[in-house]
C-alpha cells in the first residue's frame, strides 16, 4: 500500500506500514535505542546497505521512525522525509545544511525561526537577508549575489500572509538556489508545496500533524539528495524524533484529513462571523475574498486552514480583556490541536522581538491569533461573540 496515486487519507493510514509476525494492524512501537546482530558480518550487511535492517535510533534507524517518515513522504508527494524532535530542530538543521552561501528569509515568519536566523545564524557568520513578501527586486538582487537558500512560511504566523510558492521557486531556481517552505499553517491536506515547486517542505509536527497538543516534533520532506546533508546535521546535533513520538505521530496522521477539513470549515465560518463585527478592526484569514492573499491562496491551496488572526478595537487592553473572557478557548502559545486555542503573538511567539521590530512586522499589541479546534462550531462562535461583548 501507500501508492502515490492512492487518496490522501489512504496514504496517511497505509503508507509505510511494517506489520509484525503476529499480524499487528499497524507498525508497533519499537522503543529501543539500538538493534543487535548475531554476527559482525550481519551488522556490516546493514551498515553497508546490503541488507535492510535497523541500527541506532539517534540516526533515525528505527522502524517506528521509518514508518512515520514513509507516511509523511507519501502525503507530501516527496521522495523522502525526516522527522525531528521539534519544528525548530527541523528548521535549524535545514538552515545549517543548505544555508552555507546565505539565507534569504522572505516575509513574516514564526518568532523562533526569525530569532534563529537573526541571532544564531548571524553569530555563526552566516549571511541572512530579510525581505518583505512583495520585494521581488530585493529577491532578485540577493539571488544574483549568490545566496543559496530561500526560506518562507505560507500562510505565515501570525498574519496569514500568502506567498506564491510557484513564482518564488521559478525565480530562485533560475539562480540555482534552493527553496524551503514552512507549510505548518497550511498542512499537507491544504497545500502540496513540493508539487508547487518547493525543494524542501517543513512542518512543526507539534501542530496539525500531531493535532492533539500531546507531542512535540518536526519534519522535513524533499528529494533524497536534498535531505542527505540535513540528515547528517540531524544525526550529529542529536535532533531525531523519539520512537514513542514517531508512533504517536503515525497514529495522529490517520485522522489528519478529517480533522483539517473540519477545521477549514469552522475557521472560515468564524472568519465570516467576525469580519463585520463592530469590535473588530481586521480579520486575517486567506479564505476571505477581501483578504490580500486570497487570489494566490485560492490557486495554491485546496482549503484555507484552521488559523485566523484578528485585531481588536481599543488596543492592547481590549485584546487582553477579550482573551481573558473566552471560556472555550484555552490561552496557550500553540496551534493545530483538537482544542481551540488563543494567543497574543506580542506576548508569546513574537515576545523576544523588540517592540520596534514587532511594529515593523505588523505584530501589533491588539493582535489575537485563534487556532480553531474541533469543538461544535456553534459553541466556538458563541464563545467568541460572548467574549467580544465583555470588552
Ligand atoms: N513553524 C511555525 C509556523 C510555527 O508556528 C512554529 C511554532 O509555533 C514552529 C515552526 C516551531 O515549531 P516547534 O514549536 O515544534 O519547534
Image (tube, rainbow, N blue to C red):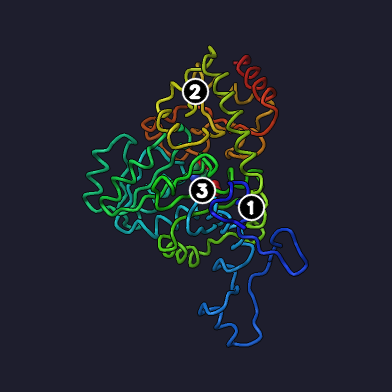
Q: Is residue 368 above or below residue 89?
A: above
At x 38%, y 49%, the residue is: 117
Give the position of the C terminus as an image quadrant.
Answer: top right
Task: Tell me, yes or no, whether the two marked residues, 1 and 3, touch with CB atoms within 8 Å.
Answer: no
Give the mark nearer the N terminus: 3 vs 2.
3
Residue 355 coordinates in the image, percent (x, y): 41, 32
State which quadrant residue 21 falls in. Answer: bottom right
The foreground one among 45 and 132 is 45
Which labelled disc corresponds to residue 218? Answer: none
State which quadrant residue 138 falls in. Answer: top left
Answer yes or no: disc 3 within 8 Å of ligand 1.
Answer: yes
Q: Is residue 260 above or below residue 17?
A: above
Give the mark nearer the N terminus: 2 vs 1.
1
In the image, taking residue 178 as reference, residue 235 lies left or right, namely right
Residue 155 coordinates in the image, percent (x, y): 46, 36
Which residue of the protein is positioned furthest toward the top in this rendering?
278
Q: CA distance from mark 1 to mark 3?
A: 13 Å
Answer yes or no: disc 1 within 8 Å of ligand 1.
Answer: no
Identify the residue position indicated by label 2 in the image: 283
Q: CA distance from mark 2 to mark 1?
A: 32 Å
At x 41%, y 34%, the residue is: 162
Q: SS class of the residue under badge 3?
A: strand
Identify the residue position indicated by label 3 in the image: 203
State which quadrant residue 132 falls in. Answer: top left
Instruction: From the image, state whether disc 2 or disc 1 is nearer to you.
Output: 1
Q: CA distance from mark 3 to mark 2?
A: 24 Å
Residue 88 coordinates in the image, percent (x, y): 50, 51
Q: Is residue 303 above or below residue 150?
A: above
Identify the residue position indicated by label 1 in the image: 249
Q: SS class of the residue under badge 2?
A: strand
Amino acid at each position: 500500500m501507500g501508492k502515490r496515486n492512492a487518496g490522501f487519507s489512504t496514504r496517511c493510514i497505509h503508507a509505510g506500514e511494517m506489520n509484525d509476525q503476529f499480524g499487528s494492524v499497524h507498525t508497533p512501537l519499537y522503543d529501543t535505542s539500538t538493534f543487535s546482530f548475531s554476527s559482525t558480518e550481519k551488522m556490516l550487511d546493514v551498515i553497508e546497505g546490503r541488507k535492510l535492517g535497523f541500527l541506532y535510533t539517534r540516526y533515525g534507524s528505527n522502524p517506528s521512525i521509518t514508518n512515520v517518515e514513509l507516511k509523511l513522504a507519501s502525503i507530501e508527494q516527496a521522495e523522502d522525509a525526516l522527522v525531528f524532535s521539534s519544528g525548530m530542530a527541523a528548521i535549524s538543521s535545514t538552515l545549517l545544511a543548505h544555508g552555507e552561501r546565505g539565507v534569504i528569509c522572505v516575509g513574516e515568519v514564526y518568532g523562533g525561526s526569525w530569532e534563529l536566523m537573526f541571532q544564531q545564524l548571524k553569530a555563526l557568520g552566516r549571511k541572512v537577508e530579510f525581505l518583505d513578501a512583495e520585494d521581488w527586486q530585493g529577491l532578485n538582487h540577493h539571488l544574483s549575489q549568490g545566496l543559496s537558500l530561500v526560506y518562507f512560511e505560507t500562510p505565515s504566523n501570525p498574519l496569514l500572509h500568502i506567498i506564491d510558492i510557484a513564482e518564488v521557486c521559478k525565480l530562485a531556481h533560475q539562480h540555482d538556489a534552493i527553496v524551503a517552505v514552512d507549510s505548518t499553517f497550511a498542512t499537507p491536506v491544504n497545500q502540496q508545496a513540493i508539487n508547487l515547486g518547493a525543494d524542501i517542505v517543513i512542518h512543526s509536527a507539534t501542530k496539525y500533524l500531531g493535532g492533539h497538543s500531546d507531542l512535540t516534533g518536526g519534519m522535513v520532506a524533499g528529494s533524497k539528495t536534498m535531505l542527505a546533508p540535513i540528515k547528517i546535521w540531524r544525526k550529529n546535533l542529536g535532533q531525531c524524533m523519539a520512537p514513542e513520538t514517531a508512533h504517536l505521530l503515525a497514529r495522529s496522521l490517520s485522522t489528519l484529513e478529517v480533522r483539517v477539513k473540519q477545521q477549514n470549515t469552522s475557521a472560515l465560518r468564524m472568519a465570516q462571523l467576525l469580519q463585520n463585527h463592530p469590535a473588530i478592526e481586521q480579520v486575517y484569514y486567506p479564505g476571505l475574498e477581501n483578504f490580500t492573499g486570497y487570489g494566490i491562496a485560492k490557486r495554491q491551496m485546496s482549503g484555507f486552514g484552521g488559523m485566523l488572526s484578528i485585531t481588536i478595537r481599543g488596543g492592547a487592553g481590549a485584546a487582553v480583556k477579550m482573551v481573558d473572557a473566552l471560556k472555550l478557548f484555552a490561552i496557550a502559545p500553540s496551534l493545530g490541536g483538537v482544542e481551540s486555542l488563543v494567543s497574543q503573538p506580542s506576548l508569546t511567539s513574537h515576545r523576544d522581538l523588540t517592540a520596534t521590530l514587532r511594529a515593523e512586522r505588523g505584530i501589533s499589541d491588539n493582535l489575537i491569533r485563534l487556532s480553531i479546534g474541533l469543538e461544535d462550531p456553534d459553541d466556538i462562535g458563541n464563545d467568541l461573540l460572548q467574549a467580544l461583548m465583555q470588552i
